[in-house]
Amino acid sequence: MFSCLPPLREGKDASQAVKVCNGLRDRISTHLGSNYTVISRNQTNLALTYFGYKDDELLPESVLPDLATRAEAGIMIVTVLAPTGDGRYAVTAQVRGLATPVEVSLTQVAGEPLEAVGAALADLIKSKM
């Protein structure tokens, strides 16, 4: 499994996206148990470096299928983070590689840590699978 985001914005939004992915990755690992291997942040960064990217680099969606294939990831989660204009973020996550793709969306509650937003996305994904 891969968690990736498109590079629509740099700086603060990029670091915020990493926080969402960390929360999603940690929670989805508990939901999936031993049925799947979830690629850790460290493993993801090693793969990114190997393929010429920087640690925690946000990737354009066009490179995700090739990167997932090279990493032998049968299922990947593609997330898109967008500021709402009032200091919060709206996030959409698509699970690709399943017989029926899953897509979930939510908006951060004011003051909610972004890792908790990622965890909530994982809970929504679980409820749809």
Image (cartoon, rainbow, N blue to C red):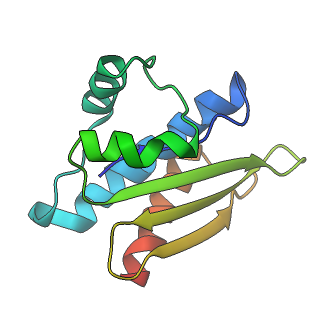
As drawn, which residue projects farthest toward the right?
A: 85
How many dots with numbers? 0
126 above or below 115?
below
Q: Where residue 36 sits in the image (x, y, percent)?
A: 16, 60
Q: Where residue 64 sits in the image (x, y, percent)?
A: 45, 45
Q: Is residue 90 rendered to the left or right of residue 3?
A: right
Name the image quarter holding the C terminus: bottom left
Q: Would residue 64 be visible to someone looking at this image?
A: yes
Q: Nearer the viewer, residue 110 or 24?
A: 24
Q: Is residue 119 rendered to the left or right of residue 92?
A: left
Q: Where residue 73 sits in the image (x, y, percent)?
A: 25, 51
Q: Would residue 111 be visible to someone looking at this image?
A: no
Q: Nearer the viewer, residue 15 or 6?
A: 6
Q: Where residue 101 sits in the image (x, y, percent)?
A: 44, 76
Residue shown at the point (54%, 35%) measured from the top left: 59
Residue shown at the point (9%, 62%) measured from the top left: 34
As drawn, which residue projects farthest toward the left?
A: 34
27 above or below 2?
below
Q: Nearer the viewer, residue 72 or 86?
A: 72
Residue shown at the point (71%, 58%) measured from the top left: 109
Q: Nearer the viewer, residue 31 or 43?
A: 43
